[in-house]
Image (cartoon, helix red, strand yellow):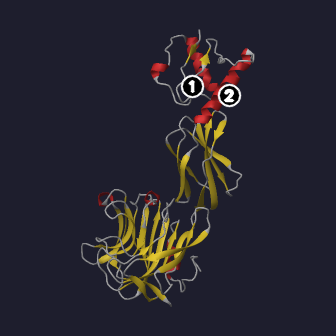
């Protein structure tokens, strides 16, 4: 006794239960289960199953097929038809968290599995490191040796492979992503270097917004100065793209300390944001605060120092995030930390950022900023101390 599962419009979409005939014949059930031997779900597409357990043939005009050959040919043809409807995995992203590469992607509907591949060059060869079960939104965590790695994800349908749609690059444990010396000294722009997704350092020009200018620098030349409550520097887009662990480093000189004044703001105030501001302590005074939120101040996660910056002299400010531990450093010393900062900066990648100003509620920092850096890793306490002892800002490297 044979039965046929009706083919839906897309042969890779599972038919509804009403389209699958019910049977109480053990022989038919066993035959249906054997469809998986061909890498196909028994309820996918149009498959004729014989009571004896063989997968039957669809008619092929002009050719006589051996009955024993027909099952394999039919299964192969069906897989190829499904592959035509199967989109490759999409939206692949990768972040480095605590020296691990965390991959995330949109799964291929109808795939039997997904294959994760890794290479040390964008040209390959790419070697399979894992096979992941199907799903809509998938992730995989890899622990490669230190170095620069490239990843791809493909979809499998039986023995057919679809994709990849793209390649992502990750540096483990991290690297310098953005450097703005802020020593240009004149004009309405500031030059900097940003690392592209392909790992190439690319020059860019940041725009000084009204109220921003130049004043005496830390060692020589001029530094970016914020002269009004709305002054700022427009940062390049994509700073938080695929960002997990990070370090933000800058030199600052405050003319005054006012609670709420902003050194860095990426996102929408009151919505989703990453910011460094002078917070308001209960005992009074403006102390450094690093905070992130995804849905407004109600879910804000913050780290706040216990004592304020010093007015009238240059001070080094450092903020790091490693996994869920946030830290604040002042002049190379750890002044605050919290293990409860679990938001992923990459989720704010579509937001614009500014140096020196956040909103009317967080007006501009009253002072100067120089030598801004963003690393895609959490520098150690000793590396932060080394940055704070630097006698030059001419090199983007930590020990330059």
Q: Quadrant of residue 5?
A: top right
Disc 1 packing (10 Å; few <14; some 14–19; many ≥20): many
Q: Nearer the viewer, residue 58 or 366?
A: 58
Disc 1: which residue:
45
Sequence-wise, which precedes: disc 1 or disc 2? 1
Q: Quadrant of the C terminus?
A: bottom right
Which secondary structure lies at badge 2? helix
Residue 364 occupies which quadrant of the picture? bottom left
Identify whether 152 is placed above or below 355: above
What residue is at 66 percent from the left and 36 percent from the top? 160
Residue that appears at 32% across and 57% down: 299
Q: Quadrant of the N terminus?
A: top right
Q: Which of these two is toward me, 271 or 335?
A: 271
Q: Residue furthest left?
A: 283
In front of the other: 242 or 191: 191
Is there any visible trace of residue 225 in the rendered image? no
Residue lying at the far front of the rendered structure: 62
> What is the distance, in whole Å, between disc 1 and disc 2 at their CAs?
13 Å
Q: Secondary structure at mark 1?
A: loop
Q: Residue 44 appears at what percent x and percent y?
A: 56, 26
From where the camera sits, is residue 133 visible? yes
Q: Is residue 331 above or below residue 236?
A: below
Find disc 2 in the rendering and name its residue: 76
User: Is 197 displayed left or right of 347 in the figure?
Assistant: right
Label 2: few (<14), some (14–19) or many (≥20) C-alpha neighbours in 10 Å: some
Q: Residue at x 68, y 50 (%)?
A: 126
């Amino acid at each position: 006794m044979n039965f046929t599962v009706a083919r839906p419009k897309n042969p890779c979409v599972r038919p509804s239960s009403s389209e699958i005939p019910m049977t109480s014949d053990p022989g038919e059930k066993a035959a249906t289960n054997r469809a998986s031997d061909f890498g196909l779900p028994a309820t996918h597409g149009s498959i004729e199953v014989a009571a004896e357990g063989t997968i039957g043939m669809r008619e092929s005009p002009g050719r006589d097929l051996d009955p024993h050959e027909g099952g394999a040919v039919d299964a192969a043809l069906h897989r190829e038809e499904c592959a035509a409807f199967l989109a490759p995995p999409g939206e692949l992203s990768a972040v480095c968290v605590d020296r691990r590469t965390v991959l995330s992607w949109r799964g291929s509907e109808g795939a039997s599995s997904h294959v994760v591949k890794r290479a040390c060059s964008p040209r390959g060869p790419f070697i399979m490191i894992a096979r992941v079960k199907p799903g809509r939104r998938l992730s995989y965590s890899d622990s490669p040796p230190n170095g620069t790695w490239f990843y791809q994800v493909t979809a499998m349908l039986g023995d057919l492979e679809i994709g990849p749609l793209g390649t992502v690059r990750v540096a483990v444990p991290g690297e310098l992503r953005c450097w703005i010396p802020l020593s240009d000294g004149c004009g309405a722009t500031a030059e900097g270097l940003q690392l592209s997704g392909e790992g190439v350092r690319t020059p860019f020009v940041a725009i000084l917004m009204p109220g921003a200018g130049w004043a005496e620098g830390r060692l020589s030349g001029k530094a970016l100065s914020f002269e009004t409550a709305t002054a700022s520097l427009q940062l390049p887009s994509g700073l938080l793209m695929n960002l997990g662990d990070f370090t933000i480093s800058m030199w600052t000189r405050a003319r005054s300390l006012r609670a709420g004044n902003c050194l860095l703001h990426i996102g929408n105030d009151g919505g989703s944001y990453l910011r460094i501001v002078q917070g308001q302590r209960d005992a009074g005074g403006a102390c450094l605060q690093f905070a992130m939120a995804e849905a407004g101040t109600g879910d804000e996660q913050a780290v706040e120092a216990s004592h304020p910056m010093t007015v009238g002299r240059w001070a080094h400010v450092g903020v790091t995030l490693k996994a869920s531990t946030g830290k604040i450093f002042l002049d190379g010393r750890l002044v605050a930390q919290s293990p409860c900062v679990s938001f992923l900066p990459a989720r704010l990648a579509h937001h614009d950022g500014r140096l020196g100003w956040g909103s009317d509620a967080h007006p501009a920092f009253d002072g100067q900023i120089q030598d801004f850096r963003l690393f895609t890793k959490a520098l150690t306490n000793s590396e932060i101390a080394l940055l704070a002892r630097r006698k030059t800002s001419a090199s983007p490297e930590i020990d330059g």
